[in-house]
Image (cartoon, rainbow, N blue to C red):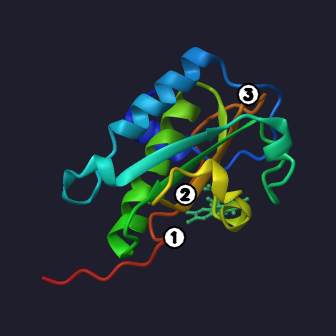
Amino acid sequence: MELMTMLHARKAVREYTGQVTPDQLQQLLHAASAAPVGRGNYDNYRLTVIQKPEILQQLPGIYDAPTVIVVSAREVRTSKYLSAGAIIHNIELAAEDMGLGANYNLYCVASLPPAIIPAGFTPLFAITLGQTTTSFTPRPIPVDRIKANIVK
Ligand SMILES: Cc1cc2nc3c(=O)[nH]c(=O)nc-3n(C[C@H](O)[C@H](O)[C@H](O)COP(=O)(O)O)c2cc1C
């Protein structure tokens, strides 16, 4: 989808009808790696893909998503959270461009079992993913939904 169309068509999808395919997962991980991160230091971040039912069942607020991807970082500070947001947003846009359902998820992060996160890394942000029957068409979004002041 053309970028500006995609930006208006993307939305939080909380109903999933099936698992993402291995090929789709690779494309999502590739999109994550295309995101900007602070100082370009990609080794400060890790992605954990959760598809194990026993672990997904432990996570609150994931809407029965069959896949959750978690972004973790080492030496947590504000820039790490901002980079995690950019990574998750890249995954979301790529997912919905492929017709998958996706949604940002902060709620489940506190409930992640520490053992699944690489040693020395702290989970910061997550995204729920799955097939969906939802269609993506541009939504009317007021230009001033986020108020702006212009300094000139
Ligand atoms: C930082 C952040 C955290 C979020 N955490 C959650 C969450 O834990 N659970 C959830 O259902 N949605 C979560 N969302 C999704 C927002 O509720 C959603 O993006 C917002 O309501 C706007 O709707 P839209 O994405 O359909 O435009 C989060 C979004 C952001 C940016």
Which residue is rendered at x = 61% and y = 17% of the image? 22
**Badge 2 is on which residue?**
141
- Disc 2, disc 1: CB below 8 Å? yes
Q: Label 3 is placed on what type of residue?
A: Gln
In-image side of 141 versus 132 (left or right): left
Depicted 119 relative to depicted 24: above or below: below
Q: Residues within 10 Å of mark 2 (few under 14, many from 20)?
A: few
- Disc 3, disc 1: CB below 8 Å? no
Q: Label 1 is placed on what type of residue?
A: Arg
Q: Nearer the viewer, residue 97 or 117?
A: 117
**Badge 3 is on which residue?**
131
Which residue is rendered at x = 78% and y = 41% of the image? 65
**Badge 1 is on which residue?**
145
Location of residue 59 in the rendering, given as x and y in whole percent from the top left corner: 80, 55
Residue 78 seen anywhere in this rendered image of the structure? yes
Q: Judging from the image, what secondary structure is the residue with disc 3 in? A: loop
Q: Judging from the image, what secondary structure is the residue with disc 1 in? A: loop
Q: Is mark 1 within 8 Å of ligand 1?
A: no
Location of residue 19 in the rendering, given as x and y in whole percent from the top left corner: 75, 25
Location of residue 106 in the rendering, given as x and y in whole percent from the top left corner: 64, 64
Label 3, label 1: how far apart the Cα atoms are: 29 Å
